[in-house]
Image (cartoon, coloured by chain):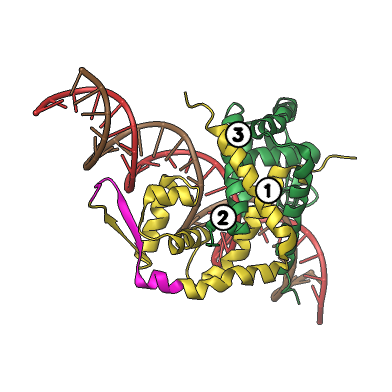
Chain colours: A green, B yellow, C red, D brown
DNA sequence: ATTAAATGTTTTGTGCGCTAATTAATTGAG
DNA sequence: CTCAATTAATTAGCGCACAAAACATTTAAT
């Protein structure tokens, strides 16, 4: 059998990720959000008032990647960034009233996308768990140089 | 049970994709390649001398995303972009000798990454296929407005 | 044959995502 | 207490990934 590009797991995951953000785009447009911004909001809906570093661990992105995302959300009035009083290096990122209010409107987004894709939850959970397994192993492998 | 951010399949796939390009980066560095550039090369190793549009379909990326990637590969001497004689709108993208030669050196990359992550092929194939299922359904859903 | 629609590529502008370097605040070792 | 490490956040620079617009070439319709 001739090898195909789609044989590669990396390409499959990469394409799936691109397809998801592509599919989310028109849905998120009504809220003037990108997928990354939406992800940050979801994280804050679960745990509010965290530092940028803590947030970056939650969403598994570099602090350097997150600063501009959070700034844009601040500009849209979704959250505030005030300096922590305990530790002035830290910024405390907290939802505003509008940011909190968006939670109710946006919770339909996930089911909207699932409906769009027509995925049922049976294999879905397995797929999700296997993705996390890949993430965990790659992260572990990347941090093995800690003497 | 309290809901967690990691319950979301979208987040899992998104994180897995980021983790993969992150893990590939140091491996690809020795070849002075990014993951996208590597993907384009892999596509050309399977089918050489294609138009940008054809290439964009192979790797599932916008032509607009691909133009700069291909240009950089051209600058590195990996491929050539000449105007098609049959249709002067088209560009024919073809590997150079160096581009073809890289195939031998880079074929170890995939196994190198798999070793790094310690993934065995049993569940791997399933994960891959389910990713493609998601991609297919999202793409189908996105193109349903064709009267 | 002329012109209108379609096709292939590039350009422009926005927003990631990463690394490396910078700045500022805190901690710790002497 | 002081000064060197550490930690938190930002900045700068690179390379995507996309949509929308611009441009040129080809095709199709009349």
Q: Which residues are magenta?
A: B86-102
- The reply to whether residue A60 is visible in this rendering is yes
- The reply to whether residue A61 is visible in this rendering is no
Crowdedness of circle 1 by 10 Å Cα count: few (<14), some, many (20+)?
some
Horizontal and vertical percent position of residue A118: 68, 33
Horizontal and vertical percent position of residue B57: 46, 47
Q: In which image quadrant can residue B79 be found?
A: bottom left
Asked if residue B49 lies left or right of residue B25, the reply is left
Whether residues under marks 2 and 1 lie with C-beta atoms below 8 angstroms apart, the answer is: no
Q: Are labels 1 and 3 on one chain?
A: no
Asked if residue B77 lies left or right of residue B33, the reply is left
**Vertically, is A61 above or below B145?**
below
In what element is the residue under mark 2? helix
Which residue in the protein does label 2 denote?
A6
In what element is the residue under mark 1? helix
Q: Which mark is residue B103?
A: none
Of tags 2 and 3, which is closer to the observer?
Answer: 2
Distance between mark 2 and mark 3 Cα atoms: 31 Å
Q: In which image quadrant can residue D27 be found?
A: top left
Q: Which mark is residue A33?
A: 3
Name the residue nearer the viewer: A85 or B107. Answer: B107
* Chain label for disc 3: A
Which residue in the protein does label 1 denote?
B130
* Chain label for disc 1: B
Q: Earlier in the sequence, mark 2 or mark 3?
A: 2
């Amino acid at each position: 059998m001739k090898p195909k590009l789609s044989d590669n797991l990396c390409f499959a995951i990469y394409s799936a990720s691109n397809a998801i953000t592509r599919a989310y785009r028109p849905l998120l447009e009504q809220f003037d959000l990108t997928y990354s911004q939406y992800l940050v909001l979801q994280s804050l809906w679960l745990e509010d008032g965290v530092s940028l570093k803590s947030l970056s661990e939650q969403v598994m992105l570099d602090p350097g990647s997150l600063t501009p995302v959070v700034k844009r959300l601040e500009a849209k009035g979704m959250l505030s960034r005030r300096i922590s009083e305990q530790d002035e290096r830290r910024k405390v990122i907290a939802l505003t009233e509008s940011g909190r209010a968006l939670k109710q409107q946006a919770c339909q987004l996930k089911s909207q996308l699932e409906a769009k894709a027509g995925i049922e939850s049976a294999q879905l959970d397995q797929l999700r768990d296997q993705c996390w397994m890949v993430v965990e192993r790659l992260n572990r492998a990347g941090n093995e140089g800690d003497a």
